[in-house]
Image (spheres, helix red, strand yellow):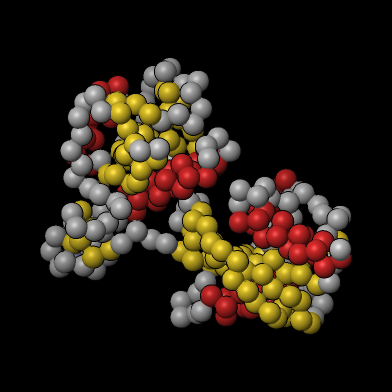
Amino acid sequence: MIEQNIKIEADQIAIWLVVSGDKLLQISGQVGQFERTWQELSFAHAYQDQIVKVGEYRQRPCLLVDMGNERVDDDSITAVSMRALLMQVDEELFGIVARAWQIALFMRTHRFCGQCGATMRQIDWEMALQCSRCQHRCYPRISPCIIVAIRHQHCLLLAQGKAHQSRQMYSTLAGFVESGETLEQAVHREVFEEVGVKIKNLRYFGSQPWPFPHSLMVGFLADYAEGDIEVDGKEIICAQWFKHDELPNTPPTLSIAGQLIQHTVQEIQQSLS
Ligand SMILES: [Zn+2]
């Protein structure tokens, strides 16, 4: 699905995802609109041989151009952050933008071989970089991260992480999977480490790529088994049981955290009716 060495026509319309620094460039005043021709993007023409096709959206190819840290000083162009875009485009386009961003980041951080230090180069049969000297090959980094909604009777366990403190937001528990660990082991370990409780009836819910910067969120539902809440104080500042109809400020349902909470609330409501 990801293609390199793309041949493009100057007047062909495509979804152009031009990355500059840690932002995406779009035409000023056209929120979430990236449909343009290559000839309109004169500021990016120096990068023509690095174009990568990252998908298709509404029958248009989606093409990534990474300008690295070069900035564009032009009033007709606005640079938007990935997080801002999350609110501006639909889920499908956001998924493609997220992929583009992760590939740009991969190329930037794998310019040299980790084994021998020689220059890495793109290969054209799959999305990977290969060492020009020792042939060591690297693929885009994906970091699996578990996320879990824990239910106890009519309540959900929600926690406030350090990152959520300023927004007074409570969310489901989440954490990175460690080397050599199954997803299930990671869920049990993270929950016990962060809030000191044991869980049971672990069920897979769904997954979501999360490009901040290259996580794959793997969602689970679980039931409380035993133990009193005891927060670790490092990642989690506060955690408590909330009744399904007295929830605090929680993430929107465009994130898997929001979907897990919504699903659990619906399950509780159904059990009551
Ligand atoms: Zn090498």
In the displayed structure, 170 sits above or below 19; it is below
Could you say where residue 239 lies in the image, as x and y percent from the top left?
Answer: 78, 64
| Residue 25 position in % (x across, y down) | 41, 31
Residue 237 visible in the current orientation = no
Q: What residue lies at 51% left-to-right and 54% top-to-bottom?
A: 210
| Farthest residue, direction top | 75
Q: Residue 249's x, y, as percent?
A: 77, 49
The residue shown at (20%, 61%) is: 130
Residue 128 picture location, percent across and down:
26, 59
Q: How many marks?
A: 0
Q: Judge by depth and name the residue closer to the eye, 114 or 251.
A: 251
Judge left or right: residue 103 versus residue 185: left
- In which quadrant of the rendered image does the C terminus lie? bottom right
On the image, which quarter does residue 222 sit in?
bottom right
The image shows residue 41, relative to residue 59, as above or below, that is above
Q: Identify which residue is drawn at 30% across, 28% down.
A: 13
Which residue ends up furthest to the left in the rendered image?
133
Query: Where on the picture, by quarter, is residue 225?
Result: bottom right
Is residue 105 placed above or below 82 in the rendered structure?
below
On screen, residue 156 versus residue 38, left or right, reads right
Residue at x 57% of width, y 80% of height: 185
Q: Is residue 126 visible?
A: yes
**Taking the image as four quarters, which one is ligand 1 found in?**
bottom left
